[in-house]
């Protein structure tokens, strides 16, 4: 992972400390309530979907859910001026650009590795995603300027996401109210993390949570899909006939340079807005994070790489993490009662970002 961090440090550099420290609370023109009474209600979530409010579900149904050990949880949310939200609204900060000021790529084009080799170096990082017989690589030198790619792979709409400040890069199944929809950049940050919005309900979704925190969909979670943050050279060895995101994005950007300054050159990412820091790991340590039955745990990928393989049990779930030397990535799997393995799709990020989003997180290091 150190090679990926080095690559990111070259590509993803902030336009200066001022960009980070001079953020202000996002209010004017934000379409967020600015006052009024705030009521509370308890919602019931099953398998990432809000199925109702606690008062609206008969208690025996909730007891049956517990008895059947189905994945569900209850969460207290707030309603201010008719707007649902699960976080204090003042935690939403302006990232500087307005809504879609960082333009998502809505009609991505792809090229062969031979074509990409003319401008993409082997040591450059990106997101690798495979579905069926299609294998795609999304270079960070491109998506650092866009943060979101609304893509369709083998007829299935998928959501490719990347937040440069947090090194959170992963893929979602973008289902909102039973329909796969496109997402955009809201112009807001939550604990330094990209806040997306869906183009169906305009709800707000911090990427590191994969969960709506403001709007109609509050409490709903997106499913993550298997992907890797990987170096281009390692990826193309496995997929020489794979597809690479083209620089023809429909936007004029200086691909190969960066819109940022020296954020990654500051020791331990000390310019992060997230305070206080959780000192169990350095801010810029790379971790995998999972949430099972409402509880969070993070795994230091460097610790896994040293051991090669780590077995763990968390929330009655047996887990194994393995280091793939060929790709130079760590992958996580759930072990079934019969010994079968199913890949788990964790949230990959800098430690400071995961710990800020989940202050009670457990840690394997």
Image (cartoon, helix red, strand yellow):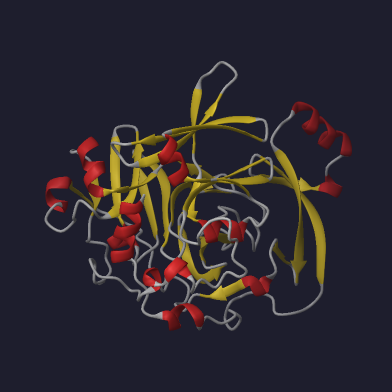
Q: Note whether residue 38 is visible.
A: yes
Q: Position of residue 96 (x, y in %)?
A: 47, 79
Left or right: 110 as drawn, with respect to 202: left
Q: Nearer the viewer, residue 231 or 313?
A: 313
The number of discs equals: 0
Q: Nearer the viewer, residue 319 or 149?
A: 319
Q: Quadrant of residue 24?
A: bottom right
Q: Position of residue 38 (x, y in %)?
A: 80, 70
Q: Note whether residue 181 is visible.
A: no
Q: Quadrant of residue 256?
A: bottom left
In the image, residue 60 above or below residue 166: above
In the image, residue 348 above or below residue 78: above
Residue plotted at (18% across, 38% down)? 240
Q: Nearer the viewer, residue 362 or 117?
A: 362
Left or right: 316 as drawn, with respect to 75: left
In the image, residue 6 above or below residue 308: below
Left or right: 108 as drawn, with respect to 334: left
Q: Nearer the viewer, residue 190 or 11?
A: 11
Q: Quadrant of residue 125?
A: bottom left
Q: Position of residue 264 (x, y in %)?
A: 38, 68
Residue plotted at (49% across, 28% down)? 342
Residue plotted at (32% across, 42% down)? 328
Residue plotted at (41% across, 46% down)? 157
């Amino acid at each position: 992972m150190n090679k990926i961090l080095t690559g990111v440090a070259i590509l993803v550099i902030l336009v200066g400390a001022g960009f980070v420290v001079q953020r202000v609370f996002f209010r004017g023109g934000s379409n967020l309530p600015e006052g009024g009474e705030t009521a509370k209600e308890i919602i019931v979530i099953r398998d990432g979907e809000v199925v109702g409010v606690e008062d609206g579900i008969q208690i025996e149904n909730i007891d049956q859910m517990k008895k059947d050990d189905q994945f569900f949880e209850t969460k207290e949310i707030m309603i201010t001026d008719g707007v649902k939200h699960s976080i204090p609204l003042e935690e939403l900060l302006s990232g500087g650009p307005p809504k879609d000021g960082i333009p998502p790529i809505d009609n991505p084009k792809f090229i062969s590795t031979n074509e990409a080799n003319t401008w993409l170096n082997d040591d450059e990082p990106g997101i690798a995603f495979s579905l069926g017989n299609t294998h795609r690589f999304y270079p960070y030198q491109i998506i650092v300027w866009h943060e979101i790619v609304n893509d369709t792979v083998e007829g299935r709409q998928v959501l490719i996401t990347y937040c440069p400040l947090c090194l959170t890069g992963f893929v979602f199944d973008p289902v909102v109210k039973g329909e796969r929809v496109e997402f955009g950049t809201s112009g807001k940050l939550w604990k330094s993390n990209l806040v997306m919005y869906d183009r169906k309900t305009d709800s707000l979704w911090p990427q590191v949570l994969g969960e709506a925190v403001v709007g109609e969909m509050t409490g709903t979670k997106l499913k993550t899909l298997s992907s890797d943050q990987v170096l281009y050279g390692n990826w193309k060895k496995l997929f020489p006939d794979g597809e690479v995101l083209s620089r023809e994005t429909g936007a004029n950007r200086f691909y190969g340079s960066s819109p940022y300054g020296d954020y990654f050159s500051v020791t331990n990412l000390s310019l992060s807005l997230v305070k206080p820091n959780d000192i169990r790991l350095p801010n810029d340590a790379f971790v995998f994070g999972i949430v099972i039955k409402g509880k969070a745990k993070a795994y230091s990928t460097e610790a896994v790489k040293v051991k090669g393989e780590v077995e763990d049990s968390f929330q009655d779930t047996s887990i194994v993490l393995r280091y793939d030397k060929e790709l130079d990535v760590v992958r996580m799997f759930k072990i079934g009662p019969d010994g079968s393995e199913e890949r788990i799709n964790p949230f990959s990020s800098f430690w400071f970002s995961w710990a800020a989003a989940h202050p009670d997180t457990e840690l394997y290091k």
